[in-house]
Amino acid sequence: MEKQKRRASPTRARLEKMAVVLFRPRLAENIGAAARAMCNMGLSRLIVVQPQDLDRQRMAMMATGTAEHLLEKMLVQDDLAAALAPFEYIVGTTARLGGVRLEYHTPREMAGKLVEVSQHNEVALLFGPENFGLTNDELPFCHALVHIPTGDCSSLNLAQAVMVMAYEIFTAASDKSHFVPRLANSRELESMYAMLQETLVRINFISHQNPEHWMFNVRRLFARHGLRAREAQVIKGICRQIDWYVGKRLEEMGGKE
C-alpha cells in the first residue's frame, strides 16, 4: 500500500529575529504596555530610541511581572540610524497617508511577507511618537509601510498598534516555503544611498536642491525588490566608476563642472 504523503509543515515567522523599535516614545506607561503586548505574542526584542521618560516603576506597572524581563534587557539608544543599522528589513507604521506614503500594506499583508523575510533576515518594526508618529525624516529608513485600518476613531494608542502588528505576525503562517535571502542591512543601504545620491546629483539626474526628496522614488524602487549586500556593493562600484569617468571628462574639458 502506498504510503500517504506528508503535508509540508507551514513556514512560521521566526519571532526571535524580529524587534520592536519605539522612536521617541513620550510615556513610560506606553513602553511598559508595548512590552506586555510583545510578550503576549512571543516577541522579545525591544529597542527604544530617544525616549522622553524611562521611569522604571511606571513601565513595570504596565508591563506586569510576565513582561518585566523584556524591560530588563531592553536596548536604549540615542541615534535612530545606529539602532536600525543591523536590520535587513525595516517596516514603518503610519496613520497618515498621501504624499510619499502612497504605497502601504495592511498588518495582515505585511505579516505574511515577514514570515518569509524573517527566515534569513533581521526585521525591525518601527513605531513613531504617540503624538504624531513617524515623520518624513524617518521614512527613508523603511523598506515598507504599514497602515492599520480603523473606524471613525482613528487614533490608536502606541501599545495597541504594537499589539495589532504582533498578533498578525504571531498568527501568520504560509503553507508553502518561499526562499528570501539575506538582504543588505540598513547600514549597508544607507552607505549605498549616500553614494548614489551624490552621483545622481553630479550627473544632474536629480535636482541639486532637496535631493533627498527625489531619492524617495529611488529608495522605493530598491525597497520593492530588496537588495542583497553584494548587490549594494555593485551599485557603489558603478557609482565610483561614473564619478571616475565624469572627473576624467571634466579634466579633459579644463576641470569645470
Image (cartoon, rainbow, N blue to C red):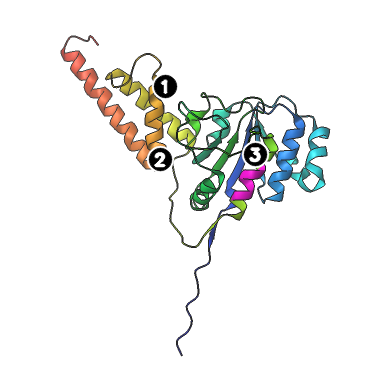
Q: Could you tell me the amino acid type at mark 3?
A: Ala
Q: CA distance from mark 2 to mark 1?
A: 18 Å
| Residue 222 seen by the camera | yes
- Judging by the rendered image, the residue that carries numbered circle 1 is 213
Judging from the image, what secondary structure is the residue with disc 1 in?
helix
Residue 45 against residue 215 in the figure, above or below: below
* Left or right: 103 in relation to 200: right
Q: CA distance from mark 3 to mark 2?
A: 24 Å
Mark 3 or mark 2: whose residue is earlier in sequence:
3
* Left or right: 215 in relation to 122: left
Q: CA distance from mark 3 to mark 1?
A: 28 Å
Q: Nearer the viewer, residue 75 or 152?
A: 152
Q: Provide residue 224's location: percent of width, then percent of height.
A: 40, 40
Q: Provide residue 95's location: percent of width, then percent of height.
A: 58, 32
- Judging by the rendered image, the residue that carries numbered circle 2 is 224
Magenta segment includes 167? yes
Mark 3 or mark 1: whose residue is earlier in sequence:
3
- Decide: few, some or many residues near mark 1? Use Cα within 10 Å; few <14, some 14-19, many ≥20: some
- Judging by the rendered image, the residue that carries numbered circle 3 is 161
Q: Which residues are magenta?
A: 163-168
The residue sitting at 65% across, 39% down in the picture is 161
The residue sitting at 65% across, 32% down in the picture is 155
Residue 210 against residue 20 in the figure, above or below: above
Q: How many marks?
A: 3
Q: Could you tell me the amino acid type at mark 1?
A: His
The image quadrant where one finds the C terminus is top left
Q: Nearer the viewer, residue 189 or 253?
A: 189
Which callout, 3 or 2, points to the residue nearer the camera?
Answer: 3
Do tag 2 and tag 1 residues touch (Cβ < 8 Å)? Answer: no
* Left or right: 23 in relation to 207: right
Extreme left residue here?
252
The residue sitting at 45% across, 30% down in the picture is 190
